[in-house]
Image (spheres, coloured by chain):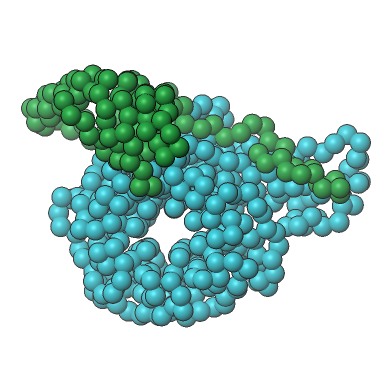
């Protein structure tokens, strides 16, 4: 809602009941308790196709291995200098400290920026294209 | 006392919003999907802007997004060289269609059986949704990257636009029927089935062509470069937005500028009217989607008409024409909103 400068003539902005709800930041949404989901919901999921159970199981196993490997890579990174390649041609180096549980943000320290060294910073993961570090 | 437009800002995207599409009206209301360079297209309730969910899976900027008419399926076109089809109720990715270059445009047929895709590889592809692994039908002919491709004329034809041409194809023979050259790079294209009208924008021009013959019906010029325009379902007015960050509303018959609004903090990339024409949505470089009322001051969605106590009903009616409203609409202020279209269950909280 934009409350601009009020003109001398009585230009009253239209009232709103509330602002639109934004993303809740913790999930991808599609609330399973919503009336629409209840009515049209999970029967359309492709994973409910039988006959692929073995293949699905194998795929899940593969995912488990990769996930565990990735999580271990994150803890191995702690305290190490990491080079981040980000959008808008940003390349920065910092010491990796921690990630949040959804891998949405990385806490880093001693972030080298063109403005100087930032003691602590939060990098938005969606802005990161890639990162490298040495074990 | 005049009413001033209060746009509703939908945040959540972290990069420019480059495309948006509405569904038709469904028993659960209507919906809007927004394509964003952050690679995460979002689904929102169309009349309130409330976030419903984010489609996660693309690995690059999403350039195009569409919904099928009852908003049960979504399709997206992305810079990761793929188009994806999603379950728009659960948010799950259903199909990934690999392409050889950036995909820019996706469009479902009415029966959901086919998906049309187009992009930088200059080819139109038609995928059978019942056999997605099968090779698509490919239509070639464009000499530069295709920006938009749409089904038209009961899906017997396809309309497509690249940098400098707009072409009409016959779906059965897969050959070009007609092509026109456009003076400047086409920035957007909208197909209006009722009346077979094609809305094309290029440079500062908003042009209306016949979707059957591609001949120009009329065109209007805006004060700045226009990136997108949309025609009201009742064809009374049109809205357009572009590089000067402003939204313009024009009378479709006369071309007279009716209203203009500042609000976005960056160029506007896409504008679309809702299926009931009560609001229009704009997507911008500033990463937001904004909802604007067609009739400013009307009670609808989250907007509420509040007539102050001091002014009696007579004074309200005596107001000299507000921009964009007629006397009949003034009397409508405060009347019931459009809840009757939807079920009476409370809105889902994000």
Q: Quadrant of the C terminus of chain A?
A: top left
Determine the residue positioned at 37% across, 53% down: B63
- Tell me which corner region of the image, top left, top right, bottom left or bottom right, holds residue B155: bottom left
Q: Is residue A130 left or right of residue B348?
A: left
Find residue B261 and report its horizontal and vertical position in percent. Answer: 66, 54
- Tell me which corner region of the image, top left, top right, bottom left or bottom right, holds residue A109: top left
| In the foreground, B257 or B133 | B257
Q: Which chain is green?
A: A
Observer able to see residue A78: yes
Find residue A36 and report its horizontal and vertical position in percent. Answer: 43, 32
Find residue B99 and report its horizontal and vertical position in percent. Answer: 21, 56
Q: Which chain is cyan?
A: B
Q: Is residue B170 left or right of residue B7?
A: left
Q: Quadrant of the N terminus of chain A?
A: top right
| In the foreground, B70 or A97 | A97
Q: Residue furthest front?
A: A116
Q: Is residue B313 left or right of residue B66?
A: right
Observer able to see residue B71: no
Find residue B201 and report its horizontal and vertical position in percent. Answer: 50, 68
| Number of numbered discs on residues | 0
| In the foreground, B10 or B321 | B10
Determine the residue positioned at 78% across, 37% down: B306
B33 in relation to A107, above or below: below
B273 in relation to A101, above or below: below
B250 in relation to B166, above or below: above
Q: Is residue A92 left or right of residue B323?
A: left
Determine the residue positioned at 61% across, 69% down: B222
Determine the residue positioned at 59% across, 46% down: B291
């Amino acid at each position: 809602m934009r409350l601009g400068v009020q003109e001398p003539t009585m230009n009253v902005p239209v009232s709103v009941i509330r602002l639109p709800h934004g993303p809740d930041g913790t999930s991808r949404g599609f609330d399973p308790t919503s009336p629409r989901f209840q009515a049209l919901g999970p029967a359309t999921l492709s994973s409910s196709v039988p006959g692929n159970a073995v293949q699905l199981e194998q795929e899940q196993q593969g995912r488990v291995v990769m996930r565990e490997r990735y999580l271990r890579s994150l803890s191995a990174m702690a305290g190490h200098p990491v080079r981040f390649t980000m959008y808008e041609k940003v390349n920065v180096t910092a010491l990796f400290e921690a990630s949040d549980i959804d891998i949405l943000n990385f806490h880093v320290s001693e972030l080298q920026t063109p403005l100087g060294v930032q003691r602590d910073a939060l990098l938005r993961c969606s802005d990161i294209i890639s990162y490298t570090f040495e074990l | 006392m005049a009413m001033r437009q209060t746009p509703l800002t939908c945040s959540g995207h972290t990069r420019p919003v480059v495309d948006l599409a509405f569904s038709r009206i469904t028993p659960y209301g209507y919906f809007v999907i927004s394509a964003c360079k952050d690679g995460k297209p979002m689904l929102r309730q169309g009349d309130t802007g409330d976030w419903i969910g984010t489609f996660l899976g693309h690995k690059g900027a999403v350039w195009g997004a569409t919904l099928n008419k009852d908003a049960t399926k979504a399709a997206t076109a992305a810079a990761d060289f793929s188009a994806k089809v999603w379950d728009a109720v659960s948010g799950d990715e259903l199909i990934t269609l690999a392409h050889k270059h950036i995909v820019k445009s996706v469009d479902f047929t009415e029966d959901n059986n086919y998906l049309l895709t187009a992009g930088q590889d200059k080819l139109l592809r038609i995928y059978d949704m019942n056999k997605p692994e099968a090779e698509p039908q490919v239509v070639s002919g464009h000499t530069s990257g295709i920006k938009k491709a749409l089904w038209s004329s009961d899906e017997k034809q396809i309309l497509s636009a690249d940098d400098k041409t707009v072409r009409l194809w016959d779906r059965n023979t897969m050959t070009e029927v007609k092509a026109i050259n456009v003076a400047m790079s086409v920035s957007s294209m909208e197909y209006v089935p009722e009346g077979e009208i094609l809305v094309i924008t290029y440079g500062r021009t908003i042009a209306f062509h016949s979707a059957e013959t591609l001949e120009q019906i009329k065109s209007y010029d805006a004060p700045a470069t226009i990136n997108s325009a949309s025609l009201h379902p009742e064809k009374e007015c049109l809205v357009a937005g572009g590089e000067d960050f402003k939204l313009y509303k024009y009378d479709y018959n006369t071309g007279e500028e009716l209203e203009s609004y500042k609000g976005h903090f960056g160029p506007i990339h896409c504008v679309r009217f809702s299926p009931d024409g009560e609001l229009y949505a704009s997507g911008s470089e500033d990463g937001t989607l904004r909802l604007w009322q067609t009739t400013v001051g009307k009670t609808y969605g989250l907007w509420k008409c509040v007539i102050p106590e001091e002014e009696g009903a007579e004074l309200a009616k005596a107001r000299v024409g507000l921009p964009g409203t007629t006397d009949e609409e003034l009397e409508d202020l405060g009347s019931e909103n459009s809840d009757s279209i939807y079920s009476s269950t409370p809105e889902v909280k994000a």
